[in-house]
Structure formats: structure tokens, C-alpha cells
């Protein structure tokens, strides 16, 4: 008897499939703009100097590898709490924030969703339209009903803020609202500080539960500036919310799976109770997290010298992205396509380029340039060596 005889193939991840197609392409001029990874000027994933230094120090010390506690390395979770909520956070001082090391930002989303599925009055989550593809899948897998809220205005290439407010106001109390803290994936359209204040006030008034996904802290304006959504939600007096954060991009540690889940509760006693549930959830999935990535991040954040080095390197990544946006917009304008000026206003690695699926197909077939079917491009995969080629191709397909 064959146990798996009735198992049918399910579709693979479309973005990862794009990379397979790119790898199989033999054209030397090919460019992969479909990825969700920051590449440096030489087209490689950077190994940050601060990370390399701490790695060498840790290797020299060569400690034994016992299990970490279920909720992770204490030095990592406390440094994360400070980075995400700020040094002077009243919530942290009051013992209201329970931070747990997770398997990447994805793990934080899933563990957070599992917690909410068991504790909120109803498991409904509203995600932005569009959102990172995995948001829908992760919350669905945790038993949530997933609904959309208006977010992007394709005609104006920017945020549809009125539409967003109107949709959020219609949600039933107790609904979870998934918010991208900064560098919205896939659109690159972010809220201003004033808009965050309006959203936070609305969430409080309508008793909605904020679940902030912060996968790109430091990739747009700076560490504190990109964390403004967390500060504003806290200051709005919303007593409970969640922040899922990831160091995959900001430390260029994709494969180390470094993320964290921070749950804010109304008081320290509630926070301890919530943490006990989180530990139980983790115990039954992967028991405890891995040591290496957390030790690297904690080591860098805990050293004045390495932290300064990391902040400088993060600043360089952010500056390069801004320069690439400006460079692409300038080149397109020079080629007679000034309508792409909006790309410079978008934040983070991604841009909704406005290219149609048919144009994306032509880019791939005729130029070996790979973008997501929605028109999402990864600006951080551009460099001085491919920018002109990409600009010319984009210009050609949009004429
Ligand atoms: N949230 C968003 C918005 C993301 O873009 C990503 C990564 N692409 C994640 C979460 C997941 O991060 P990680 O790779 O650390 O699991």
C-alpha cells in the first residue's frame, strides 16, 4: 500500500519559482528584480563587518551548544525589546512587553497568530491589499479568517489613506489588523507620522488589535524613525498589541532565521501569563530556537563598538537604496519616461513599478529581467552595472 498515493502536488511559492527561472536563464545580461533580498553593489548578499567580527570572536571563544530557553537568548530578547520599543519605553519599564526569540520574522508572525487564535474573541485578521503574500497564508494556517483593507491606489502609485481608514472603521471590535511598520512589502508606500496617529486613534476607538510587522527597521530613514509606528500605537494608549520583527534584512542574516515576537499586555501580570502561553506554543512546534544567529545579533547590539559599526553599515544599505531609486528615476526621465518619478517617493527595498503583468512578461522574455507578476521590483537588486540596462528595458516595454 502506498500511503501518499492520493497526495496531489500544490503550487510552489511564485517568487521562489521566479528565482529558479532566473537561475536557468543563460543570458549574461539577466537581472533578478524578483527577489526579497538586499544585494550590494557587486550583486552579492553582504556579510556585514560587524557580523563578521562578532562571529570571529564567538568562534575563538568556542562555547558548548546547550539548548536555549524556549523563549530564546535573554541578551537577544532584551536588546531587541530596546531596539523595537526604544531605550526609554514606559511599556518596557512597566514590564508589559514580553519578547520572545523566534525563527525569523515569519516565525514571529506564526507564533503570534497562534497566540491570538486562542485568546481573542474571534480569529479574524485584516491585511493590507496588497500585502506580503505569506501574511494571508500564515494567518490562514493558524485558523484565522483573513480579510483585506484598502491600502494602495494603483492609479496614483501611492497610499489610498482615506480608503484605508474607511475599511478599518468597518471592522468588528476584536479584529486583528496587520500593519507594516515601514518599507511596505510589496508597494513601498508608507504612512506618514500624522497618518499613523490617525490610524492608531481609529484602532483604539474601534477596539481593533494592532499586529505590527517590522521586517525592515532601519531600511528607510533610520532605526528610531522606522519604528515610529510602534511608538505611536503605544502612545495612543492601546493597551495590548503585538510587534513581530526580523533581522534578516537589517543584519543581512537571512539564513540564520533571526526574528522576535513582542507582545504588549495591559500590565506585568498579564504579560507573564501571555508569555507562558507563548512558551507552550513554541514547545509544541520546535521546542526552542537556535543559538548562532541570536548570539551574533546580541553580540553586535551589546557592544558599543560593533553596534556603531552595524548602524553605519545599515546606513550605507539605506543610502544605497535611496541612490538607486534616484538613479533609476533620473535615467528613466532622461530616456523620456518621467512618469516613473513616484519610485523615488517609495520606501524600502520594494517598489510597485506600475508595470502590468504583460509588461513584466516582456521584460523577462525579451530582456532577461525578472520581476514579480504584480510589477513589484526589488530596488536593492539594482546596481551601477545593470541600472541603465533595466531603465532602457522598462522604458521600451512601457511605450
Ligand atoms: N514580513 C515581511 C513584510 C517581509 O517582507 C518578510 C520577509 N520577506 C517577513 C515578514 C519575514 O521575515 P523573515 O525572512 O525573517 O522570516
Image: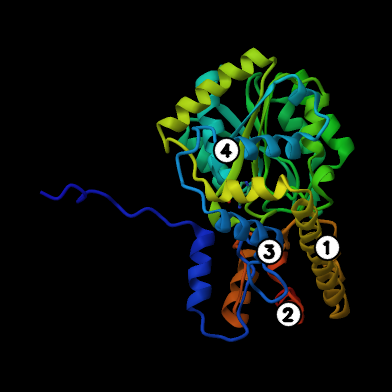
Asked whether the residues under the numbered discs 2 and 4 touch, taking CB atoms below 8 Å apart as contact, a structural biologist would say: no
Give me the C-alpha separation between circle 2 and circle 3: 19 Å
Q: Earlier in the sequence, mark 2 or mark 1?
A: 1
Q: Which mark is residue 310?
A: none
Choose between 360 and 57: the one closer to the eye: 57
Q: Earlier in the sequence, mark 4 or mark 3?
A: 4
Question: Which type of secondary structure does the marked residue at label 2 adopt?
Answer: helix
Q: Which mark is residue 396?
A: 2
Disc 1 designates what residue? Answer: 319
Within 10 Å of the Cα at label 3, are there few (<14), some (14-19), or many (20+) other Cα atoms?
many
Image location (x, y in percent) of residue 228: 82, 38
Within 10 Å of the Cα at label 1, are there few (<14), some (14-19), or many (20+) other Cα atoms?
some
Name the mark nearer the viewer: 2 or 3.
3
Asked whether the residues under the numbered discs 1 and 3 touch, taking CB atoms below 8 Å apart as contact, a structural biologist would say: no
Choose between 159 and 293: the one closer to the eye: 293
Outermost residue toward the front?
61
Give me the C-alpha separation between circle 1 and circle 3: 15 Å
Asked whether the residues under the numbered discs 2 and 1 touch, taking CB atoms below 8 Å apart as contact, a structural biologist would say: no
Question: Which type of secondary structure does the marked residue at label 3 adopt?
Answer: strand
Give me the C-alpha separation between circle 4 and circle 3: 32 Å
Disc 4 designates what residue? Answer: 73
Give me the C-alpha separation between circle 2 and circle 1: 28 Å
Within 10 Å of the Cα at label 4, are there few (<14), some (14-19), or many (20+) other Cα atoms?
many
Image location (x, y in percent) of residue 247: 65, 49
Quadrant assignment for the C terminus: bottom right
Name the mark nearer the viewer: 1 or 3.
1
Give me the C-alpha separation between circle 1 and circle 4: 31 Å
The quarter holding residue 255 reads: bottom right
As drawn, is 292 to the left or to the right of 79? Answer: left
Within 10 Å of the Cα at label 2, are there few (<14), some (14-19), or many (20+) other Cα atoms?
some
Disc 3 designates what residue? Answer: 378
In the figure, 39 relative to 200: above or below? below
Amino acid at each position: 500500500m502506498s500511503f501518499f498515493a492520493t497526495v496531489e502536488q500544490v503550487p510552489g511559492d511564485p517568487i521562489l519559482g521566479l528565482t529558479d527561472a532566473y537561475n536557468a536563464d543563460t543570458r549574461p545580461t539577466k537581472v533578478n528584480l524578483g527577489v526579497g533580498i538586499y544585494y550590494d553593489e557587486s550583486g552579492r548578499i553582504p556579510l556585514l563587518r560587524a557580523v563578521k567580527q562578532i562571529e570571529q570572536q564567538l568562534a575563538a571563544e568556542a562555547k558548548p551548544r546547550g539548548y536555549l530557553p524556549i523563549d530564546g537568548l535573554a541578551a537577544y530578547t532584551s536588546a531587541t525589546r530596546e531596539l523595537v520599543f526604544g531605550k526609554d519605553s514606559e511599556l518596557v519599564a512597566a514590564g508589559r512587553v514580553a519578547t520572545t526569540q523566534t525563527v525569523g520574522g515569519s516565525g514571529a508572525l506564526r507564533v503570534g497568530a497562534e497566540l491570538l487564535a486562542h485568546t481573542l474573541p474571534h480569529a479574524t485578521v485584516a491585511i493590507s491589499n496588497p500585502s506580503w503574500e505569506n501574511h494571508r497564508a500564515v494567518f490562514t494556517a493558524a485558523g484565522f479568517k483573513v480579510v483585506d483593507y484598502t491600502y494602495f491606489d494603483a492609479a496614483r502609485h501611492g497610499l489610498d489613506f482615506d480608503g484605508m481608514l474607511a475599511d478599518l472603521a468597518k471592522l468588528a471590535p476584536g479584529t486583528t489588523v496587520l500593519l507594516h511598520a515601514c518599507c511596505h512589502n510589496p508597494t513601498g508606500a508608507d504612512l506618514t507620522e500624522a497618518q499613523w496617529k490617525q490610524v492608531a486613534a481609529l484602532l483604539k476607538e474601534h477596539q481593533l488589535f494592532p499586529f505590527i510587522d517590522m521586517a525592515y527597521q532601519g531600511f528607510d530613514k533610520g532605526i528610531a524613525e522606522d519604528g515610529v509606528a510602534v511608538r505611536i500605537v503605544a502612545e495612543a494608549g492601546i493597551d495590548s498589541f503585538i510587534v513581530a520583527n526580523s533581522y534578516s534584512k537589517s543584519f543581512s542574516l537571512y539564513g540564520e532565521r533571526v526574528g522576535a515576537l513582542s507582545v504588549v499586555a495591559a500590565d506585568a501580570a498579564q504579560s507573564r501569563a501571555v508569555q507562558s502561553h507563548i512558551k507552550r506554543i513554541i514547545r509544541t512546534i520546535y521546542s526552542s530556537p537556535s543559538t548562532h544567529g541570536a548570539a551574533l545579533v546580541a553580540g553586535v547590539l551589546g557592544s558599543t563598538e560593533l553596534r556603531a559599526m552595524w548602524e553605519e553599515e545599515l546606513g550605507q544599505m539605506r543610502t544605497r537604496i535611496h541612490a538607486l531609486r534616484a538613479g533609476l528615476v533620473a535615467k528613466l526621465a532622461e530616456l523620456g519616461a518621467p512618469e516613473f518619478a513616484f519610485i523615488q517617493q517609495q520606501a524600502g527595498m520594494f517598489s510597485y513599478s506600475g508595470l502590468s503583468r504583460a509588461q513584466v512578461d516582456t521584460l523577462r522574455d525579451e530582456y532577461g529581467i525578472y520581476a514579480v507578476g504584480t510589477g513589484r521590483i526589488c530596488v536593492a537588486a539594482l546596481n551601477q552595472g545593470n541600472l541603465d540596462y533595466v531603465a532602457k528595458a522598462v522604458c521600451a516595454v512601457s511605450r
